[in-house]
Image (cartoon, helix red, strand yellow):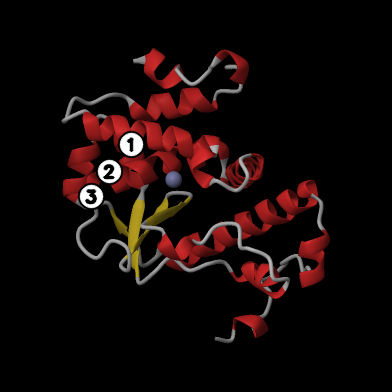
Amino acid sequence: MDEHTHPPAEGAEELRPNDVRRMDMETLVSYLWRNAARWMRQQRDRHWDDAEPLPDITRAALKGYFEPETLARTRIRRVPIIENPAFYTAFDEAGETIPLDFRVWAAITFGDLILLSDAQVPGPPPHSVIFHEMVHVVQFGALGIDAFAEKYVRGLAQNRFNYMAIPLETVAFDLQGRFEASAGRRFAAESEVLAELDPEDPPGERGGESLNRRR
Ligand SMILES: [Zn+2]
């Protein structure tokens, strides 16, 4: 509605629409992750006070996969829809495709805050949806918001904007699949997420089998 006249956030990097079109990939990646990190902080701050602890039933279902402290510090908030960030207007105005359309997402995580979309998940959230987001909570906890944003955007750009192929997402989807197949046989998902982020573990030696290999 008034998104084109929306004032830039404090300290926002003002980039004109033409700049988006002219950017080389490295400039675009840098622009995107810096704006994404700022957006994540803003969203977390905006929703934190109205968010609630994970429901008891969710914590019971995810116990054993994640540390009790991790489950305890995570908050969740229902929103009508996951809104796209204001800096997307630069893409719209340049006639460029937006990197990811969050309006069709069921949930999204900003640090230790999970937003759940009423539009996509009208009823109680399936445990596997929250499980997936908890993987991101652990990644955020280990990396911090800036490093998460940079890794995420870089992975997106390196995989032709297919978000399912972003390494931070493939870990989440792999573990989510194992959670769904685990029928309550708990495994230490949190330590596996942390091991995947360990810089001492060179990517070349990991391969696609690493998650299975560790169990
Ligand atoms: Zn995800």
Q: CA distance from mark 2 to mark 3?
A: 5 Å
* Left or right: where 200 falls relative to 55: right
Crowding near the residue tagged with mark 1, few <14, some 14–19, many ≥20 C-alpha atoms within 10 Å:
many
Residue highlighted by disc 3: 126
Q: Amino acid at mark 2?
A: Ser
CA gap, disc 1 to disc 3?
Answer: 12 Å
Q: Is 22 left or right of 167, judged from the image as shown?
A: right
Q: Residue at x 66, y 59 (%)?
A: 35
Q: Quadrant of residue 4?
A: bottom right
Q: How many marks?
A: 3
Q: Is label 2 in a helix, a strand or a loop?
A: helix
Q: Does the residue at mark 2 contact the one at mark 3 (Cβ under 8 Å)?
A: yes
- Residue 66 visible here: no
Numbered circle sitting on residue 128: 2
| Residue 195 on image: x %, y % | 48, 22
Seen at 52% across and 46% down, the residue is: 163
- Above or below, 34 relative to 88: above
